[in-house]
Amino acid sequence: MNKMTRTVRTPTQAALIGGEWIEGSGGTFDVRNPHDNTLLNTVGISSVSDVDAAVTAAKAAQPGWAATPVVERAKIMRNVHKLFLERAEPIAQMLCKEIGKTITDSREEVYEYSAPSWAKAAEEILRHRGLTFPSTQEQTNNKRLYQSFRPLGVVAAITPYNFPTDISSIALAHIVAAGNTVIWKPSEYAAVCCAMLADVMKEAGLPDGVLNLVHGMGETGNALVEHKDVKGVFFTGSTVTGRKIAEKCALRPHLLELGGDGPFIILADADIDRAVDGAINGCFYYSGQVCTSAERVLVHEDVYDEFLEKFSAKVRTLKIGNPLEEDTEMGPLCNAATLARVQDHIADAIAKGAKVKKIGPEEGLYHPATILTDVTTDMKIMQEETFGPVAPIMKISSAEQAIEIANSTGLGLIASLWTRNLASAFRVSEALPHGTVNVNETSNYWDQLAPFGGTGDSGVGRELSHWFLQTFTESKLMVFDLGGDQKYDRRAEGGW
């Protein structure tokens, strides 16, 4: 451990390394409430030497953890789930204060998504089975071929601010369930609620060094990715950062969930009332700060006016304000960088001819719920991920035009399609390259036991359920020749 670090009592200000809460040696950063800019906490930055200490602790703990019986690992996962639910409310409250997600959505994240991930990972590892294969290269019964899976070793998990306990729980639970140890760097914007979660994992019985937590910004994450003893990387965040990580992980397993372009396609035969409700959720859930947000709303000309009228009326009813109030539906943006990108995209659209309608406060980190019409494909907002509470609505004349626009960005995470026609649903869905297409469902819908991930610039690999285990374990084939007196021809037959 770096000589400048010292053990501290409170997890809300410190890193967890080798089972001890350690004050970081790289200075501090403030965590502020985006609603009113009040100071929530001051957190220690984990320096490069702190990261090295965390990797060392994880490497030392990994052989013993991998040797722990699978049933025992599963029991600890279930205990995390149980203890997490007991501590869920204060974690949800802190999550709401740190990132500005409404308290109802914060509770949904903690109770419905985050905590159950640990029990689900327990069930997945109990069912992560190998295979046996017949001998096909030789005409013999002497061969036995067995496939099994072994953990990678030390894995880094770098997680975002928008689902700080959900995305991290999915990753951490499956990584450690498989017998790996992990160093977790959460977003600096959600450092405190994530430290509270790490404390739950420690108390629930994860052995010292299995789960290590470090805090910081890009330098801390980069030190993790570049460390020679880190054998795999999980990252959720921007495409720009994801591309850099992929370049550094060329010969190491990595799972990257990156940005989305959210085409939200409404065809002429859609149920418009349901599509309006889906678009409200798709555009304004957590102020649009979701990779699966409806980033481009493409509406057939035959129903465009009806959709726009009904959608605009619904937007006007949104309650925007203090996210801690139970009936608030949309709070502030999380940080100044996100606000600046949203403002830049809207300004670019207006300069290129878009019409704008804003509903709600515009002060501090609050940005109004915004509707843009007369948008064109040359606008930034139709080419890049905006990550804010904006609905760019474009009139289209056909499903073919919608497909062309949807496929034009290089991103391919999730799309939403609205139609009553089964043939159209299949044909359009199959023509979209996105990892998921939700038919007659908002883009912000996902199932925790189904594969999730994107194509192109939206990422590499699939997370959730056993797809996560596939990335963070190594397939191992063992071939046995039992010998004996049987005579056989070693030459393959059949023109293999």
Image (cartoon, helix red, strand yellow):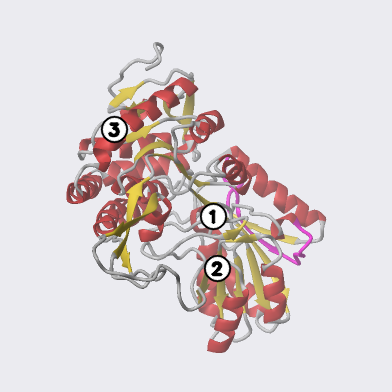
The spot of residue 161 in percent (x, y) is: 48, 43
Q: Would residue 352 appear left or right of 465 to someone viewing this image? A: right
> Which comes sooner in the sequence, label 1 or label 3?
3
Q: Amino acid at mark 3?
A: Ala
Q: Dot 3 corresponds to which residue?
A: 61
> Which comes sooner in the sequence, label 1 or label 2?
2
Residue 147 vertical position relative to residue 200 in the rendered view, above or below: below
Q: Quadrant of residue 112?
A: bottom left
Comparing labels 1 and 2, the label whose residue is closer to the camera: 1
Q: Dot 1 corresponds to which residue?
A: 460
- Residues 58 and 120: in front is 58
**CA separation in Å, label 3 and label 2:** 47 Å
Residue 462 vertical position relative to residue 361 in the rendered view, above or below: below
**CA separation in Å, label 1 and label 2:** 27 Å
Label for residue 279? 2
- Residues 398 and 299: in front is 398
* Marks 3 & 2, CB-CB < 8 Å contact: no
* Marks 1 & 2, CB-CB < 8 Å contact: no
Q: Residue at x 54, y 42 (%)?
A: 249
Disc 2 packing (10 Å; few <14; some 14–19; many ≥20): many
**Can see residue 39?**
yes
| Magenta residue span | 360-379
Disc 1 packing (10 Å; few <14; some 14–19; many ≥20): some
Residue 108 vertical position relative to residue 422 in the rendered view, above or below: above
The spot of residue 472 in percent (x, y) is: 40, 49
In magenta segment, residue 365: yes
- Circle 3: element type: helix
- Circle 1: element type: strand
Residue 245 vertical position relative to residue 400 in the rendered view, above or below: above
